Image (cartoon, rainbow, N blue to C red):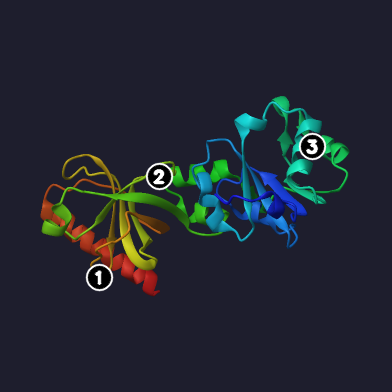
Amino acid sequence: MKNFSIFQKAKITSIAIGGFDGMHLGHQKLFSYLDKNGAIAVIETGYANLTPKANRASKTDFPLVYYPLEQIKHLQGTQFIDLLKEEFPALQKIVVGFDFCFGANRKYCVEELKQLFHGEIIVVKEIKKDGIGIHSALIRKYLKDGQLNKANQFLGKEYQLNGRIIKGQGLGKKQFVPTLNIDVQDFLIPQEGIYATKTIIDNSVHNSVTFIGHRVTTDGKFAIETHILDTEIHPQSHSLDIQFYKKLRNNEKFEEFELLKQQILKDIHNTKHFFSS
């Protein structure tokens, strides 16, 4: 989260207002209307799981200011506008989406905003891709359904999550391939399966294969494990990021460890081919 002093806020002349979970193509369109002294006002509902909490900051160069919904949802329309004017005394422009509503019971929408704010109001129409409106809820559905390609297209980038490195079974290094196990909180976890990914750790980016799901061939427990290609990592960091590029296959059970190992080697080969091509 980026914190701003009164003096920094005083320089802001335009803001985009919204929830902005995912910072997807539709959101980026709103940001394109900000001027060089623009900022993003994030209404934090607590339900964001594509770019939860302060993770939105890595998806834009504009400063972000967060407003917890619980602290502003009771405001009447004039009170909300007064808050913005107090926060941003030089404010001249507000950018919102076509379905933006605010205030107590969300009874104030675009028309009321135009009446209450004596400055420029830009209302951005619904942004579509292949005739389908781009919305965070749809991106979540794509990820849960394993439609990674569609999710990434709507995001305008690869889906990325962050996790804390934890101790795994210990089987990978001994019987299969070494993996880093991670515990993920707050982020939406894609459908179970094996993915071609990039793992970002210790400020370095590595091609990788990532498993998400229940380890049905071994202990049956849920896990997220990533194998770094072509090098063995001894991380200094306690966390890492994973970018999801392609779903390779579904999670499946193997009757023998050797069959699982053969499949893992195929997954590694397919991932190398994907990134090389």
Q: Nearer the viewer, residue 233 or 71?
A: 71
Q: Secondary structure at mark 3?
A: helix
Residue for badge 1: 231
The disc at residue 82 is 3
Cα gap from disc 3 to disc 1, whole angstroms: 56 Å
Q: Residue at x 29, y 61 (%)?
A: 236
Residue for badge 2: 189
> What amino acid type is highlighted by mark number 2?
Ile
Decide: few, some or many residues near mark 3? Use Cα within 10 Å; few <14, some 14-19, many ≥20: some
Q: Position of residue 16 (x, y in %)?
A: 71, 49
Q: Is residue 69 visible?
A: yes
> What amino acid type is highlighted by mark number 3?
Asp
Q: Position of residue 26 (x, y in %)?
A: 65, 52
Q: Secondary structure at mark 2?
A: loop
> What amino acid type is highlighted by mark number 1?
Thr
Cα gap from disc 1 to disc 2, whole angstroms: 26 Å
Q: Report the mark closest to the observer, 3 or 1.
A: 3
Who comes first in sequence, dot 2 or dot 3?
A: 3
Would you place residue 85 above or below residue 75 in this image?
below
Q: Secondary structure at mark 1?
A: loop
Q: Residue at x 53, y 35 (%)?
A: 46
Who comes first in sequence, dot 1 or dot 2?
A: 2
